[in-house]
Image: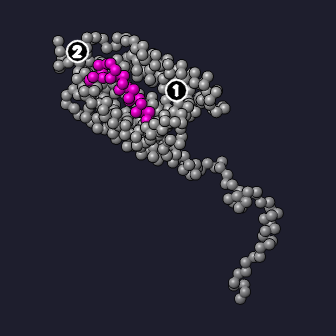
Amino acid sequence: MFFAGIEPTTNTNPWRFQFHPEVWLLIIGLVVAFVYTVRVLGPRVAPEGKIISRRQITTFTVMILLLWLASDWPMHDIAEEYLYSVHMVQHMVISYIVPPLALLATPEWLFRLLIGKGRTYKVVRFLTRPVVGVLVYNITLMITHIPQIVNRSAAGGPLHYSLHVLIVTTSLMFWVPVCGPIREWRMSDGAKMIYLFGTSLIPTIPAGWLTFAEGAVYKHYDTIVRVGGISVLSDQQAAGGIMKLGGSTLMWAIIIYIFFKRFMGSFFKEQSYNHEDKMPDSEVVGTEAPLMYSEVEAAFERTRPAIDESEKN
């Protein structure tokens, strides 16, 4: 039996548990590699006392938890078999959140060790330049929303995993100029805001397409089993809203944070009305050391009083 020309999902229980050993191997492998790097490799290679910070450890932990949440049951299975809106949330996590957290959690010495100083360094440096990163990232964004590709990849297989690897890789390229471990590769704060603002506009194209489509854009998700009773069109519209509002909100939150941290911090400090702030003596008397009363009295004695012109007459 067929529904809308698509063979329905044989499993009518979307919440059935599905074990994904490849996901667990990935998560465990990343954790083991991180611990080995910090405990074994770090003391040998890292600058003294600068192996890793507590903040980087916390960032890595959050990144691993989000990667596991987006890649394993139930989000992965609902996203790939039933709801494209959940699929959109999954892709938002692995492109907007996980990559920058991974970069922030990576110590500079480790990043430099991985890329070396030869050909790998040159390739990575080229791929992470702002123009290249933003171009490849947005091209990937558009490609991964082509109906034929989505329908084939959602069915599973090598294409599915290849697209996820592509999304994460291009996202890392995009985020390196913003929060990469090597500071000299980062853009200025003003350039970062323009960079993120421009990127926040691109998702409007596929998001609008999904929101205003009259029929099912992705036939793979046009199935009899509807999780939570959500229709195909409602699912598509939710996916478009998540793509537009979710991505834009995150980008704008980062832009606002950069603006206040870089441009407003010094302004508020200079405009402070805190009465505890004392004017330096050098601004009052022109010298670092305070003047004594005897010095002020002697200065007045050395200065002749001004003569009023009316007294001369």
| Dominant SS type (magenta) | helix
Of residues 114 and 279, the one nearer the viewer is 114
**CA gap, disc 2 to disc 1?**
40 Å
Does the image show residue 83? no
Of residues 150 and 231, the one nearer the viewer is 150
For the C terminus, the image quarter is: bottom right
175 vs 270, left or right, is left
Q: How many marks?
A: 2
For the N terminus, the image quarter is: top left
Does the image show residue 136? yes
Q: Residue furthest bottom?
A: 313
Residue 60 shows which numbered tag? 1
The magenta stretch spans residue 155: yes
The x, y position of residue 112, in whole percent, is: 55, 34
> Upstream in the sequence, badge 2 or badge 1?
2
Residue 8 shows which numbered tag? 2
Task: Kindly identify the amino acid type of the residue bearing the numbered disc 2.
Answer: Pro
SS assignment at label 1: helix
Q: Quadrant of residue 204?
A: top left
Of residues 291 and 190, the one nearer the viewer is 190
181 vs 75, left or right, is right
Question: Are the two marked residues, 2 and 1, in contact with CB atoms closer than 8 angstroms?
Answer: no
The x, y position of residue 58, in whole percent, is: 55, 27
Q: Which residues are magenta?
A: 151-173
Question: What residue is rendered at 40% in x and 18% in y?
Answer: 72
The x, y position of residue 144, in whole percent, is: 31, 30
Q: Quadrant of residue 249?
A: top left
Task: Kindly identify the amino acid type of the residue bearing the numbered disc 1.
Answer: Phe
Residue 134 position (above or below residue 305): above
